Image (cartoon, rainbow, N blue to C red):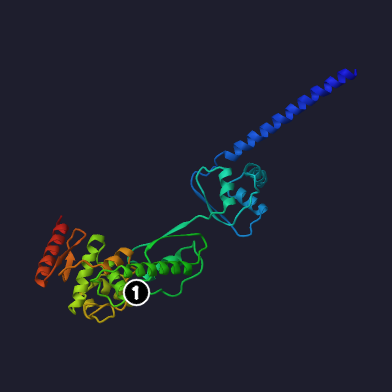
Amino acid sequence: MIKGLSSLFIRSFIFLSLLAILSASGAFLLFNHLWHKPLSHNEDQLIDIAKGTNHIQLAKQLSREGYVPSPWYYTAFRFGFSIVEQESFTPKAGEFLVPARASIADLFAIIDKGISHQHRLAVIEGVSARDVVIMLNKDKRMTGAILRIPQEGTLAPDTYFFVKGTNRADMIARMQARQELILAEEWANRGANASYDTPEEALIMASIIEKESGLAQEQPLVASVFLNRIAENMRLQSDATVLYGIIEEEGAHRQVLKSDLEKDSPWNTYRRKGYPASAIGNPSRGAIKAALNPMPSQYFYFVADGQGGHKFAKTYQEHKKNVRAYRRALANQKQE
């Protein structure tokens, strides 16, 4: 009798032990499946976790945004993370990029590491400081407001990376610091024939070069034309400076008219000798380098060649021939 009960107890214990092992194994397999199963998002997603968010709030947020079926799953995954990673799960505040088809394991690792997503902001060559400010003030990824236009030419064109919530004034400061460094480096390495009295003059010249030619290989030659003119006490006669004056004074983007060339303005280099009152945009490092390393030449004139570049001339008579050729090319293009 006792022997039979003992045998029954042993068999029951073995059965229950096996059942427990199978249950634990099943639970582990289920957890492992859910832990590594891709989420339902087929595109990259941004998840924004506010500062001070606790576990209960994060559980509700992840459920609301479709990352977990319900807040209860969050608790299971939270403890699962602690077991797998051998450390407690500590959510961080920030905006995080969750790649398409990422798993719960990926999601928890991303939030635990707290590496915020980097947004991109492109500032193109030659853009005005006013347009940069307008662009920043419209960007809803940033905070604060810029109320004053920075000095023209002091913002470095480049691609900038930032996290959501960055202050707009801080972005302006970054652009100014970069442009200041670029100008200082290029000024220190300027060529012997860079006849500027100050780095600010070079910056103004670079902004004109940027507007007059988009071809990097000919910008040093454009620089030489303008410096040759200044050396001979000639006016720069740059349409780009006149256009900038129109925008500053009228707030309008339009074509330069012949009558505009006759109006006096701090930026009308047809009427005033020397440099205009300020830079006429924010020049790139390439334009600054070209301004400070002009190609030696005897050119005083240039005009568009209809192919994206320019034809250069030493005399006004030669320049007039180039202008007529350019006009004929334009007329032929219209006929075609």
Residue carrying label 1: 251
Quarter where residue 50 is shown: bottom right
Expressed as whole percent of the image width and height from the top left, the position of residue 322 reads 12, 65
Q: Nearer the viewer, residue 270 or 188?
A: 188
Q: Nearer the viewer, residue 89 or 199?
A: 199
Asked if residue 323 lies left or right of residue 44, the reply is left
Q: Nearer the viewer, residue 180 or 99?
A: 180
Rendered-image quadrant of the C terminus? bottom left
Q: Secondary structure at mark 1?
A: loop
Tell me which residue sits at (16%, 70%) in the image: 301
Tell me which residue sits at (25%, 72%) in the image: 194
Is residue 155 visible in this depiction of the protein? no
Quarter where residue 200 is shown: bottom left
- Number of numbered discs on residues: 1
Rendered-image quadrant of the N terminus? top right
Label 1 Cα crowd, 10 Å radius (few <14 / some 14-19 / many 20+):
few
Expressed as whole percent of the image width and height from the top left, the position of residue 42 reads 49, 43
Expressed as whole percent of the image width and height from the top left, the position of residue 24 reads 70, 33
